[in-house]
Image (spheres, rainbow, N blue to C red):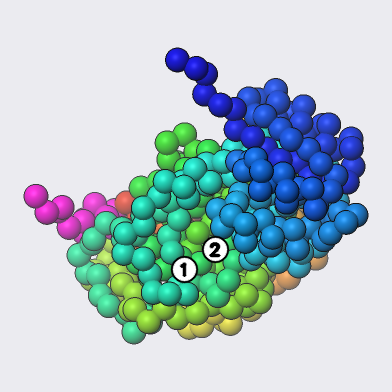
Amino acid sequence: MSAPKAPLVLLVDDEAGILTTLAGVLGDHGFATAATTSAIEAVELYRERRPDVVFLDVWLPDRDGLETLQLLRRLDPDAAVVMISGHGTTTTAVRAIKMGAFEYLEKPIAYDQVLEAARGALAARRAARHEALAGKAAAGAPTAPSGVTRDPPPLLRHLRRSREPQRTIRHSTVLYGLGLHSGGRTGLVLQPLPPGSGIHFHSLPTGESIPAHVSAVGDTEYATTLGARGATVKTVEHLLSALHAAGVTNLLVKVHGEVPVLDGSALEFCRTLEEIGVEDQGEPRLEFVADRRYEVGTGAKRLALEPWDGFAVSYLLRYPPPIGEQSYEFELTSFAAFRDQIAPARTFGFMRDLKMLNELGLGSGGRLDNFILVGEDEVINTELRFPDEFVRHKILDVIGDLYLLGYPIRGRVTAHLTGHRDNIALLRRLIEENAVPAAV
């Protein structure tokens, strides 16, 4: 039996050194490569050899890279193209993703980014070739990609049809930044999904899809991590908080391991949602309506959910000086209220914990502009956005974590000195006591 044919990657860049480097990296990991500095020749090579993946520079001497992307996609609608650029902008990245690029990487590109993008694009192309879509959505509506089921989260007692519709985003977009705990450069692509899909995280390194559901929660130490079949996505809570507030129920999030921390808050996610727009999908969403009091925790540390006509979070925080005791109550009456009162509140850490965090491999992306650093007597690195910014950020985390129920919650949350672990424990209590047995 002959050996399987190595996947072919077409490299298109005007710098010969980059072509050599990419070819070396990919060749060492089982890929065959072809290379050219010409966009025109790239189209002909694609027509003749039908490569599995293309790495395409945005700036080429004989034709614009985005125009070349468009030509390749016309030639082959399933073309798996990774755009690369040394001086691109967020606008360029967004245009590339909207035009069908699988990924957008900025130079200098790390070796692991090259391999992750190549493997992810190859998996996406293979899925597109073999996927048999049943029951396609209406013309023009987004369809769920391979690996993303349209099965809703597990049914619970006390689910009710909401007055609010299901929602997704108007078009795809991309964001870049650092991972707070990994310290690595990371990015994410947001893509619309049809009604009934739910929110899914797609791991670009592995190609696995992970539902935004408490059943997928792994680690809750310092952040909330989702995992499935060997793939993980870290620090999902800030993005989920913004999606919760905006009422987004159907979304695909493609990500390299960790959601970027940006400035440590949810404000940039809110701005992105406002920029690209959120659209109603014409079908009602389901929400979980608290029928009684649910509580987890013991002593002073406790978290409770009670009946309430709406969604509200009251939080009491207590740390040694200079933070002290803070309390805040927030009712999610509108996306604007969340954007103005909660979203700007940044994550925080203490000087005394830095050594331990480093030993655990956490906090590597913490810079002086993406979190609040608290010393013995004062905040060291920034001016606070609110006098009680710390407790507001705790509420931000609660709103994000509780969206992992798979449904918005109608009820009032009261939190005393709690964190991610308690938020997830409450969700598990809700499911344990309200799960509807599967039909036999």
Relative to residue 78, is residue 53 depicted above or below?
Answer: above
The residue sitting at 24% across, 52% down in the picture is 432
Front disc: 1 or 2: 1
The residue sitting at 49% across, 43% down in the picture is 126
Residue range in magenta is 429-440
Residue 41 lies, in percent from the top left, at 79, 48
Q: Nearer the viewer, residue 393 or 181?
A: 181
The residue sitting at 25% across, 70% down in the picture is 159
Residue 118 lies, in percent from the top left, at 64, 39
The residue sitting at 32% across, 72% down in the picture is 287
Where on the picture, by quarter, is residue 405?
A: bottom left
Query: Which kind of residue does numbered mark 1 sit on?
Result: Pro
Residue occupied by mark 1: 142
Relative to residue 273, is residue 181 depicted above or below?
Answer: above
Query: Which kind of residue does numbered mark 2 sit on?
Result: Gln
Q: Residues within 10 Å of mark 2 (few under 14, many from 20)?
A: many
Asked if one can make out residue 39 in the rendered structure from this viewpoint, the answer is yes
- Queried whether the magenta region covers residue 439, the answer comes back as yes
- Queried whether the magenta region covers residue 368, the answer comes back as no
On screen, residue 330 versus residue 157, left or right, reads: right
Residue occupied by mark 2: 191
Residue 235 lies, in percent from the top left, at 57, 50
Q: Earlier in the sequence, mark 1 or mark 2?
A: 1
Relative to residue 73, is residue 165 depicted above or below?
Answer: below
- Kindly indicate whether the residue at mark 2 contacts the one at mark 1 (C-beta within 8 angstroms): yes
